[in-house]
Amino acid sequence: MYRHELDETTKARENNLISIRFHQPNIFRFFFSSAVTKFIRIGIADKNDNPPYFDKALYEAEVDENEDIQHTVLTVTAKDHDESSRIRYEITSGNIGGAFAVKNMTGAIYVAGALDYETRKRYELRLAASDNLKENYTTVVIHVKDVNDNPPVFERPTYRTQITEEDDRNLPKSVLRASVSPSLPPNQTGIDSRPLVSKFVVYSVFLKPSFYALSR
């Protein structure tokens, strides 16, 4: 009996040549040999006995909040020691609002819904890779980048000041300063300190001899 441990993963496409000797009754056994030798070649077929795996436990990427739908953010691929396996990808958790989707056969993660930096700055997706029998997981963190998509607003709806009609000394004279800040999301007050749009525009009203002027 022939015994041999077979493992297609470590010995890919190895062909084993086996010699088998057959014995059969022969009335002329005293004159002729009764043994016949045959050679059989056996090819080892791969079995799906290994799970897919990712090179990293964490992948990170950035995307602008106004990026187009279908824009590819990054592509994450898994590997498998089994030669014949077909890997499929799926986002299993963390995809709040369906903001992203993944192409099942390639692992390309793309924008699938509206993004808003003011609403959510970070998504932590759990990505699964499956070969229909076994599966594995990795984490994909996507950071939403702010863009200048909000108009500036005055900090107060109305500004008032008083000047004296006869006060024409040391002209021009500053009588009012009004600052403009970036617009804030609903229910948010105070100064917006985002790096991209944290600049303030200050307007000053000067009293000149013959007219009022608004300068920046």
Image (tube, rainbow, N blue to C red):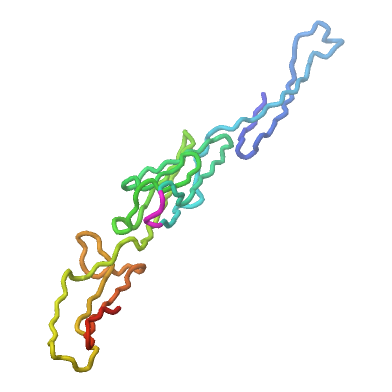
The stretch drawn in magenta includes residue 67: yes
Is 3 on the left or on the right of 77, as rendered? right
Q: Residue furthest right?
A: 31
Up-down: is 107 above or below 3? Answer: below
**Position of 116 relative to 102 (above/below):** below
Q: Position of residue 203 (x, y in %)?
A: 26, 77
Query: Image point 37% across, 42% down: which residue?
Result: 92
Closer to the camera in the image, 135 or 147: 147
Nearer to me, 96 or 32: 96
Q: In terms of depth relative to the viewer, which is nearer, 160 or 194? A: 160
Residue 44 location (% of width, % of height): 64, 30
Most frequent secondary structure within the magenta stretch: loop
Question: From this viewpoint, is residue 173 visible?
Answer: no
- Locate residue 37: give its quadrant: top right
Question: Viewed as shown, does residue 157 lie left or right of 43?
Answer: left
Q: Residue at x 29, y 74 (%)?
A: 201
Q: Horizontal and vertical percent for residue 88?
A: 47, 38
Region rendered in magenta: 64-68
Front in this rendered view, residue 150 or 57: 150
Number of disc labels: 0
